[in-house]
Amino acid sequence: MNRRARNVLQKTVMLALLFLLCFPAVPVAHAAGTVTASIPVYKAISGGTPAKAEAFTFVLAAQNGAPMPAGSVNGTKSASISGAGNGTFGTITYSEVGDYCYTIREIAGSNTAYAYDSTIYDLTVQVTWAGDVGGDLKAVQYLHKDGETTKQEKALFTNVYQAGSVIVDPPVQKVISGDTPSKSGTFVFYLKADDASYPMPSGSTGGTAVLSITGAGTKDFGNITFTQAGTYTYTVYERKGSLGGYKYDTTVYTMQIVVTRDSGGNLVATRTITDSAGKTQSGLTFVNEYDETTDPKTGDTSLRSLWWILLLAAGAGVGAALYIRKKQKKR
């Protein structure tokens, strides 16, 4: 190549570089298509069979402004399923390549017959080109439980139906009136079923449950689980102990538990308590009165003082007699 040709080539390259610096390349705008994805949710119910289908609510929440279905509010969309089955949050339209993240959870209801599923699912919708860049888009969903890495096939929430039973845990309150004991005593209470076939707390023997309370306080006999509708009657009383200074409460309470089913087929329990006089009471309260003057371990302090005075007086008298006798001998 001669000198003139080299000069021309160098000038051409310089001009090309100058053009690129002054006019940077602008990406070509592609008329990208769109792709849609439907986000499903599933509900399963274990345990018993509900008499009436319950409505369950689920929430899809977008992360970092991800696209959402129509009807969403502030990046969230709710879906409802009646009983066991499945539903969808609606259709989401994507127009750009990217990873779009969401969370899916169930909103716990107020029906105490159910134990609601607290699982949170993390969902990623990955949008890529189906073929050539600028052509059709495709969307693939990746689902896993929050804090885990194992891929899940579907956002499944399982609620446990517990309406086959209802639980009552009767508490006993012990109150100490009168003087303040120097040491807390232990008091024993009994819960007896009027019929041996009635449900009882765990640990009961022969239809009787035993409870101990040290000092004043409140404690329960334990859970009584009812699985059938009906009327159940129990008696509750305190054992008369032998602790000195105490006057024990002799009240005998009758506790009646009426178990019925509500409109949804759930078992509900109503408790009524009456005392020995047949008067309705709000709870099982026993009041023991303590009088330290009748407690052999403490006794009557005024009587004890008198004995000390008499003992001192007797000592003084003996001393005086010895002194007088000694003086008489000296004479």
Image (tube, rainbow, N blue to C red):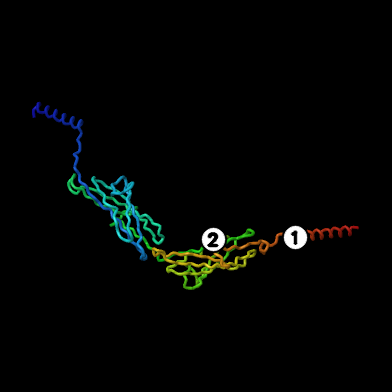
Vertically, is 175 above or below 37?
Answer: below
Residue at image mark 2: 218
Q: Is 294 situated left or right of 64 in this image?
A: right
Instruction: Residue at 62% x, 67% y: name it.
Output: 242
As drawn, 281 above or below 127:
below
Q: Is residue 215 visible in this depiction of the protein?
A: no
Q: CA distance from mark 2 to mark 1?
A: 41 Å
Q: Which residue is mark 1?
A: 306
Report the number of numbered marks. Answer: 2
Amino acid carrying label 1: it is Leu
For the point 36% across and 60% down, the residue is 54
Quarter in which the N terminus is drawn: top left
Between residues 80 and 39, which one lies in front from this camera angle? Answer: 80
Residue 224 appears at what percent x and percent y? 47, 66
Local secondary structure at mark 1: helix
Looking at the picture, how far across and down is residue 188, in whole percent? 56, 66
**Residue 164: horizontal and vertical position, in percent?**
40, 66
Measured as percent of width and height from the top left, residue 121 is found at 32, 53
**Is residue 63 or residue 269 the one in the foreground?**
269
Q: Residue furthest right?
A: 331
